[in-house]
Image (spheres, rainbow, N blue to C red):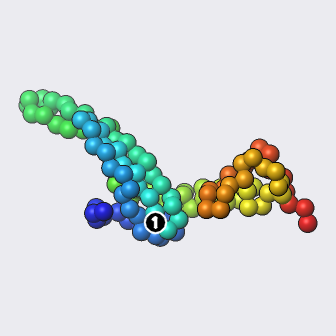
């Protein structure tokens, strides 16, 4: 891909990459992912064209673009959210052998499953 100045991942410090970029008539959509931990940001920005009082045109964004959004996230907030997510019961500590949600090797685990049972010691 190309380097657009993305900062390292706020969770693990890994390298960020743009995995998908779509530009429409008045939109910019991007998917940015950390190569190490897989944290993903899917963001969409709409652009609007306006007219200044002097008659000149101006382009206005209704929100941060995906790259600004990735680079300006508050690290401590996302770390707290990740820690809270990791504390939830998940497939790795489930005691059910007959679980219909059990992931295959390499698949993502399900967090906070409604049929989760603690492992018996």
Q: In this rendering, is residue 109 above or below 59?
A: below
Q: What residue is drawn where x is 36% and y is 51%?
A: 20
| Quarter of the picture holding the N terminus | bottom left
Which type of secondary structure does the marked residue at label 1 adopt? loop
In the picture, measured across the screen, residue 117 lies left or right of residue 79, that is: right
Question: Disc count in the image?
Answer: 1
Q: Residues within 10 Å of mark 1 (few under 14, many from 20)?
A: some
x, y (%) of residue 38? 51, 61
In the picture, measured across the screen, residue 113 lies left or right of residue 28, that is: right
In the picture, measured across the screen, residue 49 lies left or right of residue 14, that is: left
x, y (%) of residue 3? 28, 65
Q: In this rendering, is residue 13 above or below 48?
A: below
x, y (%) of residue 84? 66, 57
x, y (%) of residue 61? 28, 40
Q: Which residue is mark 1?
A: 35
Q: What residue is drawn where x is 12% and y is 29%?
A: 53
Q: Is residue 77 visible?
A: yes
Residue furthest toward the right?
Answer: 121
Q: What residue is drawn where x is 46% and y is 70%?
A: 14
| Quarter of the picture holding the C terminus | bottom right
Q: What residue is drawn where x is 37% and y is 42%?
A: 44
Q: Is residue 80 visible?
A: no
In the picture, measured across the screen, residue 23 lies left or right of residue 42, that is: left
């Amino acid at each position: 891909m190309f380097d657009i100045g993305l900062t390292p991942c706020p969770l693990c410090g890994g390298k960020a990459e743009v995995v998908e970029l779509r530009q429409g008539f008045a939109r910019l959509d991007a998917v940015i992912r950390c190569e190490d931990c897989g944290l993903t940001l899917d963001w969409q920005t709409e652009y609007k064209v306006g007219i200044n009082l002097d008659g000149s045109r101006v382009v206005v964004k209704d929100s941060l673009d995906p790259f600004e959004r990735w680079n300006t996230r508050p690290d401590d907030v996302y770390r707290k959210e990740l820690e809270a997510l990791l504390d939830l019961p998940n497939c790795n500590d489930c005691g059910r052998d007959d679980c219909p949600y059990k992931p295959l090797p390499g698949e993502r685990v399900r967090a906070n499953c409604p049929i989760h049972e603690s492992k018996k010691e």
